[in-house]
Amino acid sequence: MEDPMTTATVADAKWARQVRELAREQDAVILAHNYQLPEVQDIADHTGDSLALSRIAARAEASTIVFCGVHFMAETAKILAPDKTVLIPDARAGCSLADSITAEQLREWKQQHPGAVVVSYVNTTAEVKAETDICCTSSNAVDVVRSIPADQPVLFCPDQFLGAHVKRVTGRENLHIWAGECHVHAGINGDELAARADRAPEADLFIHPECGCATSALYLAGEGAVAEERVHILSTGGMLDAARETGARSVLVATEVGMLHQLRKAAPEVDFRAVNEKASCRYMKMITPEKVLDCLRAGTDEVRVPERIAGQARTAVERMIGIGKSGGGE
Ligand code: 13P
Ligand code: SF4
């Protein structure tokens, strides 16, 4: 009888070979976000966080960029590299956080705060970016806000937890925060984190600033329930850098579960555990191995951004890639 494991391995190897061959034929570079399925991450030319992948897209030499991530990421790549063909294996891969503010809502908010500088998280549509002064990602949000003169009010959108983190770190009172959230990260709550930290007193905590539990982690540290030096609020790329340096034997990870794959590769000797194993982004997981292959074969789905919108958004996105260090992109 045929061994099912061997059959699966042979199929995986065939898929990987086909993808690599097609990518070479099409002069395509494959980028994958840290939340992608492990096999998609492993086939990519580059994996990384939002900032690292934006920077790689901006300087890509290939004529086609295949973006294995969600739609706003591919759109950002197209804004930065307008002459390239940008493909996403499934254009329906959206983002609940990007959906939490529209360009119309942002225009109304700006009218209420004339003179304020608009900082939008990269998790926004191109139309929202076109209304923005500087975009940021989780790895450079603090540096972006610090780059703005202290007396100028800032409108920060759309993530309320990242906004609260930036406000806490910068101590900036004139930072107004939009009340949006990512359903995956908001669902990783403080009670869950406290219970897991209690059961693993030696573990480090790696927490993405979009998480509902980021404030709770700092509260736990403040209360002495968790040692302060064990709590790290980090972007996905920052987690990879921290993984390579941690002295801890185990780490509790509060972010989307796709992150565990890169962390385990970066530091195989460390036991990485998800704070919430159910924290899986259904949009990120829409990019399946079959769709990556179809995308390269058929040249779909192509991402287009009307030049009027792209032109208005480009300055904000270029400012973003010029500020701060990203972690973990390779
Ligand atoms: P980073 O990779 O920039 O940390 O972003 C996380 C995220 O939620 C992307 O959707
Ligand atoms: Fe958007 Fe959240 Fe999914 Fe990231 S994890 S793509 S923020 S819905």
Image (cartoon, rainbow, N blue to C red):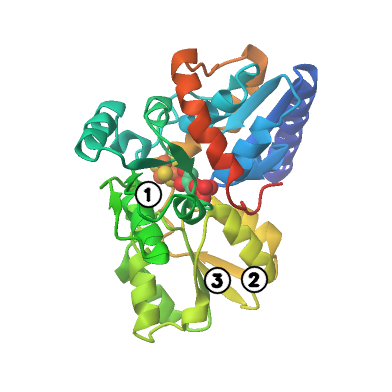
Respond yes or no on whether mark 1 lies under 8 Å from ligand 2: yes
Query: Quick one: 169 or 190, which is closer to the camera?
Result: 169
Ligand 2 picture quarter: top left
Q: Quadrant of the N terminus?
A: top right
- The three-letter amino acid code for the residue at tag 3 is Val
Q: Which residue is mark 3?
A: 251
Task: Give the percent coordinates (x, y) of residue 40.
Answer: 63, 38
Query: Quick one: 13 or 329, which is closer to the camera?
Result: 329
The residue at 19%/38% (across/down) is 112
Q: CA distance from mark 3 to mark 2?
A: 7 Å
**Displayed quadrant of residue 86:** top right
Q: Earlier in the sequence, mark 1 or mark 3?
A: 1
State whether residue 100 is above or below residue 90.
Answer: below
- The three-letter amino acid code for the residue at tag 2 is Val
Q: Are marks 3 and 2 in contact (CB under 8 Å)?
A: yes
Q: CA distance from mark 2 to mark 1?
A: 24 Å
- The three-letter amino acid code for the residue at tag 1 is Val
Mark 2 nearby-residue class (10 Å; few <14, some 14–19, many ≥20): some
State whether residue 259 is above or below residue 5.
Answer: below
Can you tell which mark lies on residue 184? 1
Give the left or right position of residue 266, taking residue 172 as reference. Answer: right
Is there any visible trace of residue 134 in the rendered image? Answer: yes
Give the left or right position of residue 129, taking residue 330 as reference. Answer: left
Q: Which residue is mark 2?
A: 270
The residue at 60%/19% (across/down) is 82
Numbered disc 1: secondary structure: helix
Q: Earlier in the sequence, mark 3 or mark 2?
A: 3
Task: Give the percent coordinates (x, y) of residue 306.
Answer: 46, 14
Is there any visible trace of residue 40 in the rendered image? Answer: no
Query: Quick one: 317 or 328, which is closer to the camera?
Result: 317
